[in-house]
Image (cartoon, coloured by chain):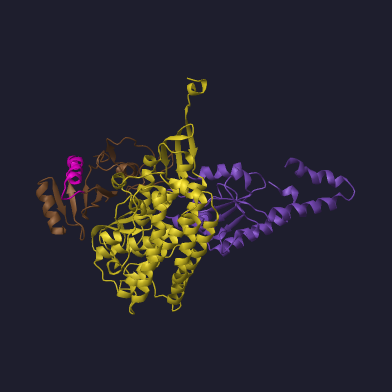
């Protein structure tokens, strides 16, 4: 990753290097955006909707999204379901195990801000954005597969805009 | 004695989960292994403990119904039902006929939907992807029916204290019949995929055998209990709603292994479809909800009411002190005991068998952690 | 066996130790003396007329004034169901474990111990169950429990 990040710096000095940089940017971002493999990370109700989105009718594969069981092979965590205080360190661990560039979608009210468990619950983490950085929030309890697809398309748009220097 | 035989395998501890695709949610197993063989399993739970019971103590009775939806999201209707039933028992309420029939239709459709999730994920755990797509294809039909009734796909909030939230739309009955007409052929399809599939049979036969005495002592209920040969179904043995008016079989098996648990659920899907058909035929006209006051206060008292959902006995223990909020709501799900018994039946098996056992028990974590 | 017969049978079988409470309208609720719990459970399971072989549920309760532990039992064979409860003391509450009678009681008792702080005498593995491993904020299901990040739902 380090080499690619430094690539634009070298190319700048070469005459016509800017064109190479922008073309590479385009190729990288397009290919990343159209094959966002997601980690099979479902904790609660939203996981069932995530499964339904992956299954026959909604068909995630159309967006080039296939589930992976290992965080090391995936580009994206769809945090589907409530994250409790006991689960929070594990989510962080999974995020840290993923290779960069990596993205997070917070699916459902619980991961956005605690959802229906905001009040009176002693065990639920009130939003996952203080555990991992979140790219797209999808509200709903649980969100419909259409909103999940829309969320993924939004993420794709975001990924397509990224330049090599922005990779984190 | 050769050199190889003298080698000793050391016991080692292996961690499985909490994020593992086959644990159906977030359950962690601490396995004590001797080579490939499992010596002991310790399930570590609590990763989805959301304090539902604490939340219920500070909600009115109408506000609790959506909370119960999240207790067991694969069959939300039966959670609504269990709670509504408990409160109705407290308040000694009369439910209109049409609401009774609508409840049965929804509960049984939801049971089919839940079994379809189980069917898909079980096959997925054992390495087959096609059944997952088949199961979810039919499940979408049922979700369409629910959606046109109450507007939600997963957390319905439909069965309320005193009846159901609203009447079904006019397209419901023809759509439902349409689904039932194709459904039996679909179950045949499922059976063609798995029932005699050699890999599936080898991985399930004689794996995780649960004898009937042990099953009862450990509190196992539902399909897992019936697979062990105990003919116990609360729809028959402790009838609630109007289940005594319907004609249906309670399938049982003898061996109590993973394969039998599979067979039971397949048969149950057919029986549920039968019940829905009868209920649609008899569906009367009329009111769908009894008169319930806006500020609902059941009389003081306590009740433990139980119903049979797709995973076994679902119980709700409610204490009321005569105010608008309950003192205590305790939820009991079938998975709680099914997960508890897993160490008992897993010892001596291999890790891959643990996955098969876990899948066949159909454990779902929010029922355990709440 | 209907409700009246069941009540009479149990009261005759355990005179003085078991009393009927008026809280259950459908199934009877009994109160069992604190020290008599294990003996009672053993007796109702082994009795041929009752045969309560199935433990449905154990629930801890904090009513504000006292703790209760409620046992819901059923018989698969005889199709009987009833509940009984015991009242542990307010200070240092403790009850006997019933794992020997119904092994399925194991996790229910762990839960009561963890969330209510009611000690279970004779339980083989009382350790963290539902709460995080590093939990140090007491027993959250007690009525007077509070914590810094615990938000109560505002009234209206």
Does B325 sit left or right of A129 as displayed? Answer: left
Q: Nearer the viewer, residue B1 or A7?
A: B1
Q: Nearer the viewer, residue A34 or C148?
A: A34
Measured as percent of width and height from the top left, residue B3 is found at 51, 20
Residue at 55%, 46% in the rendered image: A131
Q: Nearer the viewer, residue B141 or A158?
A: B141
Measured as percent of width and height from the top left, residue C87 is found at 21, 45
Quadrant in the rendering for residue C36: top left
Chain C colour as displayed: brown
* Numbered range of the magenta stretch: C33-51
Quadrant in the rendering for residue A117: bottom left
Residue B241 visible, this orientation: no
Chain A colour as displayed: purple
| Magenta run includes residue A90 | no
Chain B colour as displayed: yellow
Residue B7 in the image: above or below residue A49: above
Measured as percent of width and height from the top left, residue B301 is found at 23, 59
Residue at 81%, 44% in the rendered image: A9
Magenta span: chief secondary structure: helix
Measured as percent of width and height from the top left, residue B107 is found at 38, 65
**Quadrant into which the N terminus of chain C falls:** bottom left
């Amino acid at each position: 990753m380090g080499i690619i990040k430094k690539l634009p710096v070298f190319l700048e000095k070469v005459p016509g290097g800017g064109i190479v940089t922008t073309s590479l940017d385009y190729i990288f971002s397009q290919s990343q955006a159209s094959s966002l493999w997601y980690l099979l990370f479902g904790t609660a109700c939203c996981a069932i909707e995530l499964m339904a989105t992956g299954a026959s009718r909604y068909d995630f594969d159309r967006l080039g999204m296939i589930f992976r069981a290992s965080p090391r092979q995936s580009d994206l965590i769809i945090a589907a379901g409530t994250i409790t205080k006991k689960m929070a360190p594990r989510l962080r661990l999974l995020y840290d195990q993923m290779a960069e560039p990596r993205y997070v979608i917070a699916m459902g009210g619980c991961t956005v801000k605690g959802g229906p468990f905001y009040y009176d619950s002693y065990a639920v983490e009130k939003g996952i954005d203080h555990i991992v950085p979140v790219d797209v929030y999808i509200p709903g309890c649980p969100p419909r597969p259409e909103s999940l697809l829309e969320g993924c398309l939004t993420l794709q748009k975001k990924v397509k805009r990224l330049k090599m220097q922005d990779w984190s | 004695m050769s050199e190889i035989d003298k080698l000793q395998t050391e016991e080692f501890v292996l961690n499985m989960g909490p994020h593992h695709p086959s644990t159906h949610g977030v359950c962690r197993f601490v396995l004590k292994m001797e080579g490939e063989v499992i010596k002991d399993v310790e399930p570590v739970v609590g990763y989805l403990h959301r304090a539902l019971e604490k939340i219920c103590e500070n909600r009115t009775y109408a506000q609790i119904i959506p909370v119960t939806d999240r207790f067991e999201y694969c069959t939300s209707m039966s959670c609504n039902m269990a709670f509504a039933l408990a409160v109705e028992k407290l308040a000694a309420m009369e439910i209109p006929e049409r609401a009774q029939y609508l409840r049965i239709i929804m509960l049984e459709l939801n049971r089919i939907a839940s079994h379809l999730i189980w069917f898909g994920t079980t096959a997925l755990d054992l390495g087959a992807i096609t059944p997952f797509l088949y199961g979810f294809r039919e499940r979408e039909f049922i979700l369409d029916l629910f959606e046109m009734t109450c507007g939600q796909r997963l957390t319905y909030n439909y069965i309320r204290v005193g009846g159901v939230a609203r009447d079904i739309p006019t397209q419901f009955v023809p759509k439902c019949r349409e689904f039932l007409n194709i459904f039996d052929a679909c179950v045949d399809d499922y059976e063609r995929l798995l029932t005699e599939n050699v890999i599936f049979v080898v991985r399930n036969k004689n794996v995780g055998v649960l004898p009937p005495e042990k099953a009862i002592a450990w509190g196992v209920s539902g399909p897992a209990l019936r697979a062990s040969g105990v003919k116990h179904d609360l729809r028959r043995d402790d009838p609630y709603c109007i289940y005594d008016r319907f004609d249906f079989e309670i399938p049982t098996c003898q061996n109590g292994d993973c394969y039998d648990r599979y067979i039971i659920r397949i048969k149950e899907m057919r029986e549920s479809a039968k019940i829905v058909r009868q209920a649609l035929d008899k569906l009367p006209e009329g009111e769908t909800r009894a008169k319930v006051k806006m500020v609902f206060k059941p009389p003081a008292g306590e009740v433990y009411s139980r119903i049979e959902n797709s995973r076994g006995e679902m119980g709700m223990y409610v204490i009321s002190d005569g105010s608008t909020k309950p003192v205590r709501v305790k939820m009991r799900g079938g998975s709680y005991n099914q997960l508890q018994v897993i160490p008992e039946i897993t010892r001596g098996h291999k890790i891959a068998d643990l996955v098969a056992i876990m899948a066949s028990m159909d454990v779902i974590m929010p029922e355990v952690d709440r | 066996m209907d409700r009246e017969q069941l009540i009479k049978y149990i009261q005759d079988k355990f005179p003085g130790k078991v009393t009927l409470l008026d809280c259950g309208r459908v199934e009877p609720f009994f109160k069992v003396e604190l020290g008599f719990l294990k003996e009672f459970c053993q007796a109702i399971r082994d009795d041929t007329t009752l045969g309560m072989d199935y433990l449905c549920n154990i629930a801890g309760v904090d009513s504000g004034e006292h703790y209760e532990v409620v046992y819901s039992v059923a018989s698969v064979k005889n199709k009987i169901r009833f509940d009984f409860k015991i009242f542990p003391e307010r200070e240092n509450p403790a009850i006997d474990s019933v794992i020997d009678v119904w092994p399925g009681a194991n996790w229910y008792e762990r839960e009561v111990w963890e969330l209510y702080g009611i000690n279970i005498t004779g339980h083989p593995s009382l350790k963290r169950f539902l709460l995080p491993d590093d939990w140090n904020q007491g027993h959250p299901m007690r009525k007077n429990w509070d914590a810094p990040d615990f938000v109560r739902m505002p009234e209206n």
